[in-house]
Amino acid sequence: HKIWQGTGQVFDTVGLSLPDVVYRTRAAWIRVPDAARRECDNLGLDFRAGVHAATHAVINALPLFLMVNQSDCGAECDDPQRKHYKPTRVLIFDRQPGGVGIAERAAPMFPKLLRAAAELIEECRDCRGEDEAEGGGDGDKAEGGGDGNGDGNPKTSASLSTPAGDRSGCPG
């Protein structure tokens, strides 16, 4: 789309069809427990958007623990048009074909990464909104842990075929 910057109005649309770019890489993930979906439903929150945001928050927390740049990793972005089942998970992958070891090094520290990501969000004034910028909140921190099957262990893959750009609109 071409969009007027001043108004945000779309003034031109061009169809674009590019072939998928696929490469094998390394990934690490942790399953999101079903209890998290139920809690979001009870609170009227968008569960899928929350998982998506959590994945990007984990990527932003990576440099606190590893010598990486956020652009070294990609995020699995849920495509709502895909109808096949896949478990809900926070998944990050190495952006380099074949991987460079970021996913393997991140996997054992996923609980720490999730806590650090939650703290980054809690400390972000823009995330809290102007009304809460002076403080507020009850101090509860989101806890990581669990891959949905009760053992609390993040998973790594031997390889993952990953499209360089999916159709979800997420830059990953």
Image (cartoon, rainbow, N blue to C red):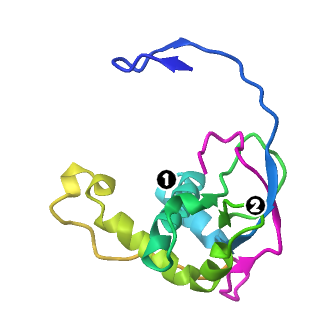
Q: In which quarter of the image is the N terminus?
A: top right
Residue 46: percent from the left, percent from the top? Answer: 54, 51
Residue 24: say if magenta.
no
29 or 47, which lies in front? 29
79 sits to left or right of 20: left
Do the residues under discs 1 and 2 have CB atoms within 8 angstroms?
no
Which of labels 1 and 2 is toward the front?
2
Q: Give the range drawn in magenta.
A: 148-172
137 or 13, which lies in front? 13
Which residue appears at 62% of the width and 58% of the height?
Answer: 74
Which residue appears at 65% of the width and 52% of the height?
Answer: 77
Furthest residue toward left: 134
Inspect the image, locate mark 2, and give the three-letter code of the amino acid beneath it.
Pro
Is the residue 85 above or below the residue 155 in the image? above
Q: Total marks drawn?
A: 2
Q: Residues within 10 Å of mark 2 (few under 14, many from 20)?
A: few
Furthest residue toward top: 11
Rendering quarter of residue 75:
bottom right
Residue designated by label 2: 97
Is the residue 131 above or below the residue 18 in the image? below
Which residue appears at 30% of the width and 61% of the height?
Answer: 124
Is the residue 118 above or below the residue 132 in the image? below
**Residue 44 marker:** 1
Is the stretch drawn in magenta largely helix, strand or loop? loop
Rendering quarter of residue 117:
bottom left
Residue 98: percent from the left, percent from the top? Answer: 78, 66
165 sits to left or right of 57: right
Mark 1 / mark 2, whichever is N-terminal = 1
Residue 132: percent from the left, percent from the top? Answer: 21, 57
What secondary structure is marked by label 1? loop
16 or 68, which lies in front? 68
